[in-house]
Amino acid sequence: MGESKRGLLERLNADAVICAEGYLFELERRGYLSAGAYVPEVVLDHPDAVRQLHREFLRAGSDVIEAFTYYGHREKLRIIGKEDLLEPLNRQALELAKEVAQEATDEPALVAGNICNTNIYDPGEPGTEDSCRAMFAEQVGWAADAGVDFVVGETFTWTREAEIALEIIKQTDLPAVVTLAIPAEGKTRDGDLPAEACRRLEDAGADVVGLNCYRGPATTLELLEQIRERVNCHVAGLPVPYRTNAEQPTFFHLPDPACDCLPAEGTFPIALDPFTCNRFEMAAFARACYDAGIRYIGVCCGGAPHHVRAIAEALGRRPPASRYSPDLTKHFAFGTDESLKEVNVGYRDRM
């Protein structure tokens, strides 16, 4: 382990910072939380599962261990009748992130606190801002107590809700990364274009602004480039690893005509498998981001360690997991190694 630990902005000023997200979808796929409510009870019920995923993302090249407190807020715990677990869940998630961050083979990984969309913000509802502010203050306070390196506020569809989150983060003097999730119409729900909303957040004190979730690489990159042109601070891009397109710019309504056994609600969120980006697509996204001057790069819901490793390798890195990167020259039928048996190599076109 290295002797010193650089902060977020120092690292961003020097090179890219990779941030692995995707805990909700990956832990649901592994059978540790329920799709729908998506409450991270796994933090308390199966902490070793969270540790393991943190480790896998770290080995794959993530510079950040983000505490799994996404949707660990009061409103989500209210829905499942477990508000009493709010503080224990948050504090445990933060401790798990801190623990694994120390396992980095070079300098320790950065530890990020996390807050997100409250699902209660309503500009037409009196008192909604105060309710959001109180929810953010709880989680940010616990993150600051835990000694995190910075705080991520993410997946905001309302510019104003993001501003409230930023206000609370900045009270701690910790660096703030604030990212928006842009609906299909291409604007925040307040009516702001992404670049306009990000400029507002920069003006309000955000250290990093950008986009996460909702959109895949194909429908995120252009918006990120517009943001990069509009703001002076660092820009973050963390798309979902799904093949969204111009007709379906978000992953909520992707149709799958090849499957006649889907539930009535469609492919989102538990039948998106056919639309998953491969590792090469995520690598290409990372490289395009870097070339466009975007330095905080990662993957959101649906992301897995192989996506993170591909991002790291695209940026010229060799994380520990690269020891096991593919070497198809050794494949028994499709390889090129001279020691392979012709009886198998010669049969490849008939397989």
Image (spheres, rainbow, N blue to C red):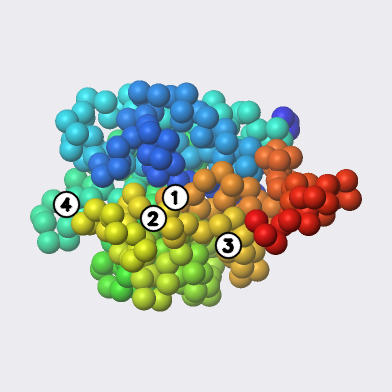
Compute the Cα span from label 4 to label 3. 40 Å
Residue 29 in sight in this render: yes
Mark 3 secondary-structure assignment: helix
- What amino acid is found at the position of numbered circle 2 in the picture? Leu
Mark 4 secondary-structure assignment: helix
Compute the Cα span from label 2 to label 3. 16 Å
Residue ID at (48%, 40%): 66
Residue ID at (46%, 30%): 50
Give above or below for 101 relative to 346.
Answer: above
Compute the Cα span from label 2 to label 1. 9 Å
Q: In which quarter of the image is the C terminus?
A: bottom right
- What amino acid is found at the position of numbered circle 1 in the picture? Gly
Give above or below for 49 relative to 131.
Answer: above
Residue beneath disc 4: 128
Residue 94, disc = none
- What amino acid is found at the position of numbered circle 4 in the picture? Thr
Q: Which of 29 and 172 is in front in this view?
A: 29
Mark 2 vs 1: CB contact within 8 A: yes
Compute the Cα span from label 4 to label 1. 30 Å
Dot in front, 2 or 1: 2
Answer with left or right where residue 101 lies relative to residue 168: right
Q: Where is residue 88 in the image (x, y as percent from the top left)?
A: 33, 24
Residue beneath disc 1: 302
Mark earlier in primary sequence (3, 1): 3
Mark earlier in primary sequence (2, 3): 2
Mark earlier in primary sequence (4, 2): 4
- What amino acid is found at the position of numbered circle 3 in the picture? Glu
